[in-house]
Image: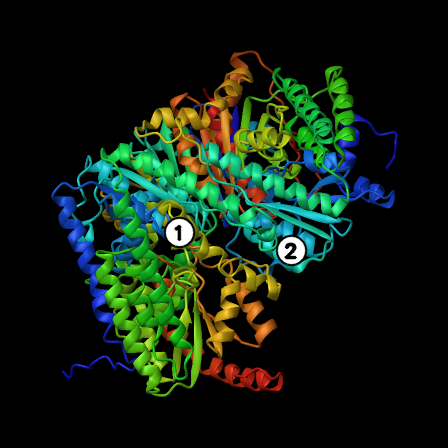
Amino acid sequence: MYFAGVDIGSTMTKVVLMDRAGNLLSFIKGPTGAEHRRLANEVMREALEKASLQIDDISYIVATGYGRLNVPFADCQITELSCHARGVSSLFPNARTAIDIGGQDAKSMKIDNGRLVNFVMNDKCAAGTGRFLEVTATTLAIKLGEMGAISLKATKKIQISNLCTIFAQQEVVALLSRGEKLENILAGLHDALTSRVAALARRLGIEPDLVLTGGVAKNIGMVEAMKQNLGCEIFVPEEPLLTGALGAAILAKETYVKAAAAGEALPTKSRRLEKATFFSQEYR
Amino acid sequence: MVVQKEKKTINRLKSMYPLRAKVNETYLKSIEAIQAGKPAVWAMLNFYYGDPILKAMDIEVVYPENYGAIAAAMGVARQYLDRADAEGFPTHLCGYSLTTLGYASRMMKELKGQIPPEAPLGGMPKPLFLMSSAAICDARYKWFQALGRYMDVPVWPLEAPIPGIKEFFIEGYYDKMVKLGVKHLRDFVTFVEKMVGKKMDWDKLDKTANLMIEVNRVWHQVNELRKARPCPMHSRDFWSAMPAALFLAGDLEDSLRLYQDMYREVKDRVDNHVGAIPDEEYRLLFAELPPWHSLAFFDKLAERGWDFVIESVGYHPPIPVVLSQISDPLERITKFSLQFLVGYYEDARKQNVLGGTTAYPYLKYANEWKCDGALLHPLISCRSASTHLPYVSDMLMEKLKVPSLSIEGDIVDLRLFNPEEALAKAEPFEETMDYYRKMRKQERFDW
Amino acid sequence: MSGKNKGLSKAREIYLNRSQRARELKAAGKKIIGYPCVYVPLEMLTALDLVPYQTCGDMKEPVTEADRALPHAFCPIMRNCLHCALKGKNDFLEGMVTIHSCDPQEKTARVWESYTKYPYFHFIDMPITVRPEAVEYFKGQLDDFRKTLEVFTGKKLSKDRLEVATKSHNRQRALVTELYELTKSSPPLISGTEIVQVVKALTSLPVAEGNDLLIETISEVKKRTAGPEKKSARLLIWSSTLDDTDIMQVFEAKANVVMNESCGGVRAYRGEVKLTADPLEGLADYYLNEITCARTFRQATLGETRKDYARDLQSRFGYLRGAIRDWRINGVIMLLVRYCDPFAFEMPSLKDYLNSIGIPSIYIEYDYTVGALAPMRTRVEAFIETISQQ
């Protein structure tokens, strides 16, 4: 008996396969891109191959993320908020707050008893998302993955005053030409991004343990900035991009097992792995 | 290192300084009185309607709107804004309201009623009651209602009727507005009496109302003198001198003398053709709220010959009206307050300008103060000070061939106003103003 | 208009082509008068044989025409309404009645009047409180409205005419109340989406035709065998206006919306106008007191010198408690457009009230464009997921 969680984010697609005991059998992540939004089936195929399984082996499939409606073979769609909350609390049983900073959005989730109980999202403004750092990496011609390490070398506190991602870049260029050191500027940028996210999270209140997920969690400079800004310990999973798909797989397992125990029939979709079309009538 | 002295191109009026100082003095005296235990009320700009009542009852008045501007200028607004955000207030709301809500949350929830130690200039104490006003915008009366989350103090929202320009001329319309105003104010007096535990001194109110009207009449005359060429008084002097009249700061007899002094000084300049700036090349109007924290920007423009001759209709005194024959001070106050709004209606109707009661006066300003251009300053979180601006721009061009330049800012996020960027737009705008001068000449306008 | 459509299918047809009946009536010689806000007393129009028509926006329209006179940081719904008007979508109107309910209504009214050329235009002012002098003032405003209507129509707005019209509009209120009784069951017999269509239809028809539509619909729905599917959540939507089925569909994908507390739902139809000696008094009293829009300032006791937050909340929002109980609502969505000040200031207090009576709620902001639907869907679904666990 196996279960699958498929998380189609705006930048990355992730699939997690799990067995009845909760062991992870495989996980895959690949860029979503414009075409890939319709190609969840490809990513799924890869994951199955890795785990030496067939699609028919999967008892229940939950899709989540921005593109969750584009997974025709998913039995059910659950929002990434519930899935992240579930995934995070399976890895960190004492987690009460989860903050996910993705490529295009940021969200804060309140967790109680392993479940989502409240949330707040920002998906209007790039200044509180991974995009902020991506744009900066381009402006400064450095690798996104190196930014964190460089920022940790900062010796001076710089305030980036611009609210807007685009105008912040102008400010960065101006600072460079004034002779400010790169590491100080980067630390300032991490600080600016952190304060946006912190403001979002404070709307719900921040209760420990606090877990940080999403691509930005791999940036050690960001983790450090968040520790300082929020004044508490920050836990980061080994694979910060996978908590959504992990949570989806766990919810798939729990849904299936619960229905089986109650003797209820669970509606499932056909196990044909095919591209999503815009006219598929299978969505409820 | 050579210390660069700020170039002062604008010839400031001597009589402006005591008026400006008066506002600070009054504020500091007020803080002292409050710290000594005098009751304080939080109020907001109410156009001469509620203020005389509070003044006659000798109540100290705190204006969170003004405090919001102070907090912004002193760089402490951010923490209060973040707090308001955390409390769940949507971020598009007026920056002053968010600052106050954040402040109230900090003072009441966190500090159990103690004034926050980081609050500049003595902060704002927990008030006896809140007096809001429907004038200008919805946010203002809803904001004081929302403060109820943090402070169990009563709220009194003052009514402020706003007629349609045509509808106002229906027979009996004005009288009904006055009836509402007078009855409402009478009930407000009763409310205030209960709150402070003493009766209204009607003689004092009578005197206060008369002084308020006279102070504003003189102040109005001062601004009429600015029609002269060259203009004797710059907008910077207007903004420095107006709070005393608009907020009835301190001793009104003292204010009256100071405005009379100002009248004499300005008249003197007019008679001797002395301008507010050395070479008046362009005459401009400004709408609506100035960038309080960046007023030196106008000095830079003055170096280019830009004289700001008229501004901010929301801050201007009403067109004078004779009210001395009215025995009831509440009726006098009501009519004076209504005059602020409806004083322009007759003209607006003649000109068939229906758009916005705050828009029409700019047409009169541009025409009578002979303006070559309009500098418009829309503010992201203050919609009521910004909504009419596209209409004003349209109206000025269509009716008078006067061009407008729009430069954005905000009331609390001061980073949004960029003086360098604004100055960069000045030169091309001069060419625009030159061009439209020629156009106006062709159309037989006299400026 | 095809005569064969009745009840729900007729409502659906009108929803998709709102102005059709108004155009037919205009061709037959009737005068159609537009109004942008439910605070306008329609009884006064009906009494003079004018056909009221609500001038709504359209979420699918890219708003371009409003740029002339309204900044972008402004109520997107009113911008949209103005855009539609300037684009000529309401060209069958003989006139407009605007009203000072909120800032955007007041400011757009001036612009609307300046940029269009209807034969009739009237602006009604409104006080912000419900104090006696305020109600008196509002009555005076309605009297002035009567004067310009009489000049425009050449007819007298007599007490008899007004009473007949008031009874007809009261009948509509009673019928809508009856319709909402049908959402009490589990599952509800009629969906939130269907009710949006019905209410939209009511704002596009003369009151008598609207009443007929309601009677047909109520009868049809009562006999229904295949109504909405039962979902895990029963929601109340609190909003300024919610009159678009696309939005409702986002909520109803995973919930039953059993109460729409907005101007596209139940707000304009509560209670009834009292038939007073001076009919304008009953109207002024009803519209100022009964319409539960956040723009009106209410307090537990008028002119109170003592304040208690819990009591204040009860006086402002207590009317929701009965509905939440009787319709067995287990979640509230507070849906606001960006830049709506009255509702935005109200929202945290409403949340406090709902918390005090143990009802979960969520605040969702949108900008009245189709692009807002996808993010809305995620938030709504996540909210339903959290309340379904309880």
Amino acid identity at mark 1: Gly
Q: Chain of mark 1?
A: A
Amino acid identity at mark 2: Glu
Name the image quarter holding residue C147: top right
Is B139 located above or below residue A281 in the figure?
below
CA gap, disc 2 and disc 1: 42 Å
- Between tags 2 and 1, which lies in front? 2
Which of B377/B83 is in front? B377
Residue C273 x/y as whole percent: 62, 26
Left or right, B123 with respect to A280, comes to left
**Crowd band around label 2 with a 10 angstrom C-alpha radius: few (<14), some (14–19), many (20+):** many
The residue that mark 2 highlights is C113
Residue A131 x/y as whole percent: 43, 56
Residue found at x 59% / y 55%: C110
- Give the numbered dot on residue C196: none
Which of B69/A245 is in front? B69
Residue B255 visible in this rendered orientation of the protein = yes
The residue that mark 1 highlights is A128
**Crowd band around label 1 with a 10 angstrom C-alpha radius: few (<14), some (14–19), many (20+):** many
